[in-house]
Amino acid sequence: MPYKIYHNTRCKHSRAGLEYLKSKTADIEVRDYISDIITFKELKEILLKSNLKPSQIVRTNEEYFKTYLKGKSFTDDEWIKILIENPKLIQRPIVVGKYKAIIGNPTEEIDKLF
């Protein structure tokens, strides 16, 4: 099973994570999750493998978060729906292995998959 990286080509941390992952393995599936939106089921699986709640993968420095979400309370399923509809809010890169997923920022976090 290849490692899957949920990647945003416009993000320097995501690009660094992809290069770091390439230095570890050639068995990689790259998924541009901005243009190829993550499904509800996929995001649930990522969260399960990473042992994180949806609110823990939100980029709180994004303008959309500051304007519309900051200070509000949402259920996990509501957060997942918000993240799917606003993928720029998802921390990146996310790297998924067979049993575990991590946020690859800093890039050394990727080592936890090997």
Image: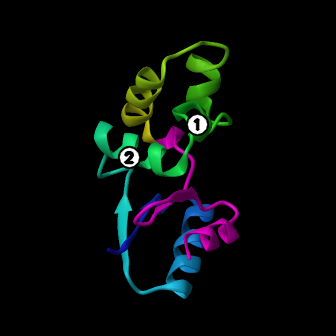
Residue type at the position of mark 2: Glu
Q: Is residue 53 above or below residue 109?
A: above
Going 56% across and 63% down the picture, which residue do you hit? 14
Residue type at the position of mark 1: Val
Q: Do we see residue 39 in this rendering?
A: no
Name the mark on residue 82.
none
Disc 2 designates what residue?
45
Q: Quadrant of residue 60?
A: top right
Going 59% across and 27% down the picture, which residue do you hit? 65
Q: Nearer the viewer, mark 2 or mark 1?
A: 2
Going 42% across and 31% down the picture, which residue do you hit? 80
Q: Which residues are magenta?
A: 88-114
Q: Position of residue 114 (x, y in %)?
A: 56, 77
Disc 1 designates what residue?
58
Q: Is residue 80 above or below residue 18?
A: above
- Check the picture and name the quadrant holding the N terminus: bottom left
Residue sitting nearer the eye, 111 or 61:
111
Residue sitting nearer the eye, 8 or 83:
83
Tell me the distance, in whole angstroms, between the alpha carbons under discs 2 and 1: 16 Å
Secondary structure, mark 1, is loop
Residue contact at pointers 2 and 1, CB within 8 angstroms:
no
Going 63% across and 73% down the picture, which residue do you hit? 111
Residue sitting nearer the eye, 48 or 67:
48
